[in-house]
Structures are given as structure tokens and as C-alpha cells.
Amino acid sequence: MKLLKDKLFIKGLVYDLTGMATVAIPLIGPFLDLLWAPYAAKKMREMYPGKKGKLASVIVFLEEILPGTDIIPTFTLMYLYSFVWKKQPQPQVIEVESY
């Protein structure tokens, strides 16, 4: 499982850097965002299945389409939310008295 998490982290960094690179290209960058946004949303959905993946894909699409928001590392933030910040449920211990 740790290997899967590491692969997701590295993939996320690459996708974030690719999305941010369009800012560095004058005049053409905003048009590249029109192509990159749906691709990034698709990749986010593939990387994180379920409801959180659907929501994250919408967020990454909007982040890539809207001007000035390319610097937000959405893939990295999603990885941190999924594997670092989200608390794992603690097992509940139920004590039973015997008679």
C-alpha cells in the first residue's frame, strides 16, 4: 500500500508541475489550459476513485480553467488530504462483563 501512495504522490507532483508550467508560456499558456483542464480532471478521477475523486476532479478542472489559479497544487493537496491529514478511524473496544 505504501508503494501505491508513493506512486500517487509522484504522479500528483508531475501533474501539478505540468499544470503550473502553462503559466510560464506567454500568450499560449491560457489556451493550453483549455486542453489541460479536462485531461487533469480525468487523471484526478482515475487516481482517486469514489466521491472524493469526483469532487476533486471538478475542483482540479475549475482550478485549471480559471485564470490565476494554476499555482494551486491540487493533486498534491488531494494526496495530503487522502493519506496524511485524514484521520483513520480508531477501532472501538467494547467491554463485556461475563456472569
Image: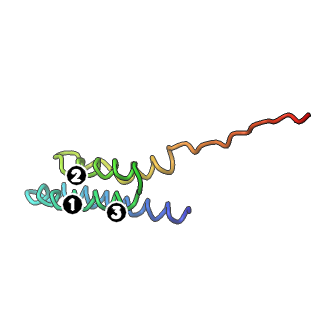
| Residue nearer the viewer, 3 or 94 | 94
Figure quadrant of the C terminus: top right
Question: Going by the picture, which residue comes out furthest to the right?
Answer: 99
Q: Label 3: state its secondary structure.
A: helix
Q: Quadrant of residue 26?
A: bottom left
Q: Find the distance from the CA under tag 2 to the CA under tag 3.
A: 15 Å
Crowd around label 2: few <14 · some 14–19 · many ≥20 (10 Å): many
Contact, CB < 8 Å: mark 3 with mark 1? no
Q: Label 2: state its secondary structure.
A: helix
Observer-side mark, 3 or 1, equals 1
Amino acid residing under circle 3: Val
- Label 1: which residue? 36
Amino acid residing under circle 2: Glu
Observer-side mark, 2 or 3, equals 2
Q: Quadrant of residue 89?
A: top right
Q: Label 1: state its secondary structure.
A: helix
Mark identifier at residue 14: 3
Q: Residue at x 34, y 51 (%)?
A: 54
Mark found first going from the N terminus, 2 or 3: 3
Crowd around label 1: few <14 · some 14–19 · many ≥20 (10 Å): some
- Label 2: which residue? 64
Crowd around label 3: few <14 · some 14–19 · many ≥20 (10 Å): some
**What x and y, as percent, mark residue 5?**
50, 60
Mark found first going from the N terminus, 2 or 1: 1
Mark found first going from the N terminus, 3 or 1: 3
**Vertical arrangement, residue 49 with respect to residue 97, above or below:** below
Q: Find the distance from the CA under tag 3 to the CA under tag 1.
A: 13 Å
Horizontal side of 72 relative to 82 (left or right) equals left
Amino acid residing under circle 1: Trp
**What x and y, as percent, mark residue 78?**
40, 50
